[in-house]
Image (tube, rainbow, N blue to C red):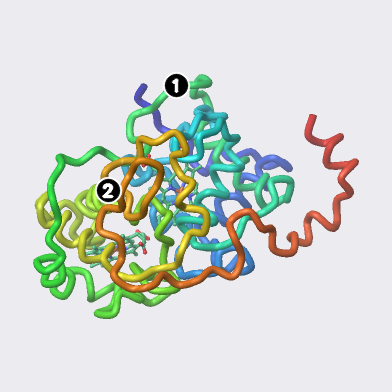
Amino acid sequence: MDYTPPPDSLIPNDELGASIRRGLALVTHTTDSLPAYATGSLQCASCHIDAGRRRDAAGLLGVYSRFPKYMDRSGAVVPVEDRVNYCFTRSLAGNRIPNDSREMQDIVAYLAYISLGVPAGRHVMGEGMPKMPKLTGDSGRGSLIFATTCAVCHGQDGQGTPPAFPALWGPKSFSIGASMAREERAASFIQHFMPQNKPGSLTDQQAYDVAAYVDSHVRPDSPGKEDDWPSGGAPYDVPYNTKGHVAYRPPSAKLFPRPHPPTTLVPAPASIMKSPASMRAKGQK
Ligand code: HEC
Ligand code: HEC
């Protein structure tokens, strides 16, 4: 269905509205707001442009209505909180935030707001990222495109100038377990939204070439990644081995180790300490 989320001006002026506004701030200023969880240079909105409201830019429109959802990558039906934590641990190469923290509930309140009116289970136009024609990137050609078209914002060394310009590789960028580490997914994002000052100016082939170049660099590891797609069927461009799948162009150098495996919770945010479990349970149902 065609869907436009309600504007910020209609966020109610009550407690729920305050939570929605906090959630919007968290996805836009993730590294400032949640430094213990977003440990790199990326915000949620670095990929989910306009805080997920831009169509096709990993669009989060209507996302709340699509959960719980079966994810073949984890071989399980997951709630939206777990999906958010997937992006915390993989796309931000950061740490899991407790599902019952106020911060997680604020993010979910915001996701529910940009899904208002979408019936459960319905898909909307502009969610996710458009599929690309299947091409093969050439990282040599990609390096030339990068130098002339991308380095002005993301730096010759790909490290950007955070928080304005996020890193594309290195210890502060997305992990190897992120969708952006897949050549076709990165090519789709890049073809439609980069360079940010001239989106749509690259051909599909150029987008693949520069995606191949970006994804050829070393980045944070994603411990446990070999257990992804436990029933097989990984997409062709996943850059690491999984059941029945051989890595497509694994990075040439050793990945940056991660201090916390994806399931570990680093010390809970203060909001959890303040609200006893009993009160939370009462407040939720
Ligand atoms: C490096 C880029 C990147 C960053 C940073 C990122 N994400 Fe994602 N996220 C993605 C991609 C790519 C997808 C999958 C989109 C697709 O292919 O359909 C996704 C999917 C999601 C989904 C599920 C969407 C659906 O319809 O199933 C949610 C929810 C989500 N992200 C939330 C977040 C939140 C919250 C943050 C910050 C904590 C975040 N993401 C950070 C790239 C990113
Ligand atoms: C004018 C500055 C600018 C240029 C030029 C530019 N980008 Fe970006 N890029 C950004 C900004 C800013 C973001 C974060 C999203 C946003 O705020 O719109 C971003 C986000 C990204 C992301 C997702 C986040 C991350 O760090 O991985 C990728 C991938 C990316 N750019 C790749 C490229 C590539 C490849 C090129 C060259 C074809 C390019 N960009 C050119 C400014 C730029």
Residue 136 rendering spot, x and y as whole percentages: 13, 51
Q: Considering the numbered disc 1 on the image, is that residue within a helix, a strand or a loop?
A: loop
Indicate left or right for 99 with 251 as reference.
right
Q: Is residue 243 above or below residue 140?
A: above
Question: Residue drawn 33% across and 44% down?
Answer: 245
Indicate left or right for 172 with 240 as reference.
right
Number of on-image labels = 2
Q: Nearer the viewer, residue 17 or 104?
A: 104
Q: Nearer the viewer, residue 238 or 92?
A: 238
Q: Which mark is residue 122?
A: 1
| Quadrant in which residue 4 is drawn | top left
Residue 143 rendering spot, x and y as whole percentages: 15, 71
Question: Residue drawn 34% across and 56% down?
Answer: 181
Question: Residue drawn 64% across and 67% down?
Answer: 36
- The amino acid beneath tag 1 is Arg
Q: Which mark is residue 146?
A: none
Ligand 2 is found in the corner quadrant, namely bottom left
Confirm or reject: label 1 Cβ below 8 Å from ligand 1: no
Image quadrant for the C terminus? top right
